Amino acid sequence: MTTYREHYQSAMTEPEQFWLHQAHRLPWFQPPKQALQQTGENRYSWFADGQLNCCYMALDYHVAQGRAEQAALIYDSPVTNTQQHFSYQQLLQEVRQCAGTLKSLGVGKGDRVVIYMPMIPEAVIAMLAVARLGAIHSVVFGGFAAHELAIRIDDATPKVVISASCGIEVNKVIAYKPLLDKALALAEHQPDFTLIVQRSQLPVELVEGRDIDWHDALQQACPAECVAVASDDPLYILYTSGTTGKPKGVVRDHGGYAVALNYSMEAIYGVKAGDVFFAASDVGWVVGHSYIVYGPLLAGCTTVLYEGKPIMTPDAGAFWRICQQYQVKVLFAAPTAFRAIRKDDPEASLLQQYDLTALQSIFMAGERLDPSTYEWTTEKTGKPVVDHWWQTESGWPICANLMGVEALPVKPGSSSVPVPGYCIQVLDDSGQPLPANQQGNIAIKLPLAPGCLQTIWGNEARFEAGYLSTFPGYYSSGDGGYIDDDGYVFIMGRTDDVINVAGHRLSTGEMEEIIARHPAVAECCVIGVSDELKGQLPLGLVVMKNGVQLSAEQLEQELVAMVREDIGAVACFKQAKVVEKLPKTRSGKILRKLLRDVADDKDPQIPSTIEDPSCLDDIYTQLKA
Ligand code: COA
Ligand code: AMP
């Protein structure tokens, strides 16, 4: 097969043949004989009769195939001035020791391990070690505050939590251990042990009987070997923002995920074993799971783990330096990273200092790639720039230009065409398919491609209600957009209360729940407003209770502090405006779209159902103040 069309048609018309062929390119303990099995209404299982271990596929297999000396992981940390190479053999050795440690702490198949780590090699080692034992990891992004960590600990009920003494942001050390201690004080569930990586920048005291020093434990451990698991056993739980304060634990399987990622490495990213892949994300996000850890290693590539920012560490040439130094073939980052680089170095003069000959293409995802960032990056680098659309739920791209198969013409603003395995339709609110070029709800016809979420951890009902019941027979993506006459998909934004801040997915509903707890707040709403750098920023609109003696400035400060304390600095919640009244429909629904339009200086369409249009004057004044 040499064209996109051939791949797509084959995956849609002969899915058994197509996906079994892809599956058999990986080293299973027991290769599957069947690709897809329906297990219930709207429920499917991929490669159900297969037995495997993702850690084996990612490490042991490559060592056995002669890649022992090849670099598996390059850790590049400008914030600690460290560069370290791990060969496949070395990484395997570390992972076996870590798995041995976890085993000695009682972790076995199906047990959960929460990982709350900065971008250090131990985070990757921990993930693979958990997978090696057939246990389930749940990585929590290091930028989240103690309260968020506590919610995840209570939901995943881990036997062990793995963390580090600190993380390092630009010019500041973030003490992780106190955050972990606070989370454990808040959580109902208590792990049996915590395993702590002591970093020289901030060594911490360990609690005897509970906290274990990572380095001591790994040195003493007996190495552990891979445990075979069924294809649809869970590999990990990854929490993502929904519309309420309780994040959703997306459950990913082993087999479907491994097959999908391995296919994507070659077909979408156009890389093969031995190539260097640099995903500038964080292991706490899905991009980190799929394209810092599992994807590149399954494919026998070298992955770059970068503990730094696109700018400021030390400058806007950081990505280009890494690309030259490690001969990176594919660079993958969020558009916001390139907007930041463009802001600091508009003429890309730093780029001229580096030789990017090895760089084949640049991929972007996490938020919409606006045409101007696309144009700038294409012009300055001279490389193909590929926008691709996906979600924590899908685990790998849903729409992309398949650079390893056939590079289709680019349409700026579009994340290209559906990836083989996904049947995408645009539906109106009643579930009827819309014609080309008409904007509506982006839905994916069931069954989903391999690699997509199986359920929500411990909450089948939420899986059903959140994704499957809105449009029967379809997965509802929560994104809106349209498909043009040529079949290109344009993702235009969320249709729910999820916003995207610097490529980080956050829930405005969750922020509202926090703000509503303030004793002075009668009513509130949080919307995402456009921001040149971060794509979107949250903005709170608050109605104060009558008779409260508190200035608007003081209330704003307190609300900002509350959101920072509960969600974390990463929420970037910095603005809360006091208004007299929120605009609502006669049935009491807050008119969020109207508010977004006013805040973004778009021509607001005032719906006829508005209860009291006069409240808009005050809102205009506040938002423009
Ligand atoms: N641990 C602790 N704190 C963190 C953190 C982490 N892992 N990541 C971010 N934070 C904190 C930052 O220190 C900052 O705190 P502050 O308010 O005290 O300054 C806050 O969260 C916001 O961080 P960030 O969004 O990174 O903003 P920034 O202004 O420091 O940097 C960019 C701006 C554009 C450079 C940065 O947002 C960026 O690199 N974006 C790309 C993100 C990305 O790769 N997303 C992809 C997911 S696919
Ligand atoms: P996350 O689950 O954190 O990966 O965020 C997924 C959400 O980010 C999607 O539902 C989209 O709203 C947005 N997103 C991701 N990639 C793109 C893209 N290429 N274009 C437009 N939106 C995107």
Image: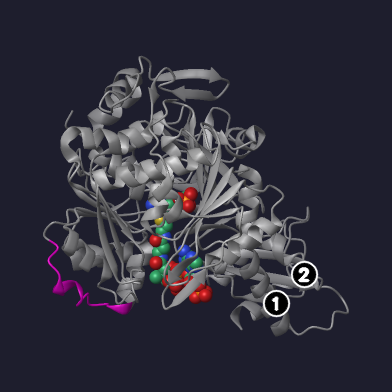
Q: Residue at x 36, y 64 (%)?
A: 307
Q: Which residues are magenta?
A: 344-356
Secondary structure predominantly adopted by residues drawn in magenta: loop
Which of disc 1 and disc 2 is earlier in sequence?
Answer: 2
Q: CA distance from mark 2 to mark 1?
A: 9 Å
Left or right, 276 with reference to 499: left
Residue at the spot of label 2: 518
Q: How many marks?
A: 2
Q: Position of residue 42 (x, y in %)?
A: 55, 24
Name the amino acid, label 1: Glu
For the C terminus, the image quarter is: bottom right
Q: Does the CB distance between marks 2 and 1 fall below 8 Å?
A: yes
Name the amino acid, label 2: His
Residue 262 shows in this picture = no
- Label 2 sits on a secondary structure element that is loop
Q: Position of residue 438 (x, y in %)?
A: 45, 45
Residue furthest right in the image: 547
Q: Position of residue 293 (x, y in %)?
A: 35, 47
> Can residue 347 be found in the magenta stretch?
yes
Vertical position of residue 308 compared to residue 39: above or below = below
* Res. 562 image quadrant: bottom right
Between residues 570 and 340, which one lies in front from this camera angle? 570
Within 8 Å of ligand 1, the CB of disc 2? no
- Label 1 sits on a secondary structure element that is helix
Residue 381 shows in this picture = yes
Vertical position of residue 325 compared to residue 130: above or below = below
Residue furthest top in the image: 33
Mark number displayed over residue 558: 1
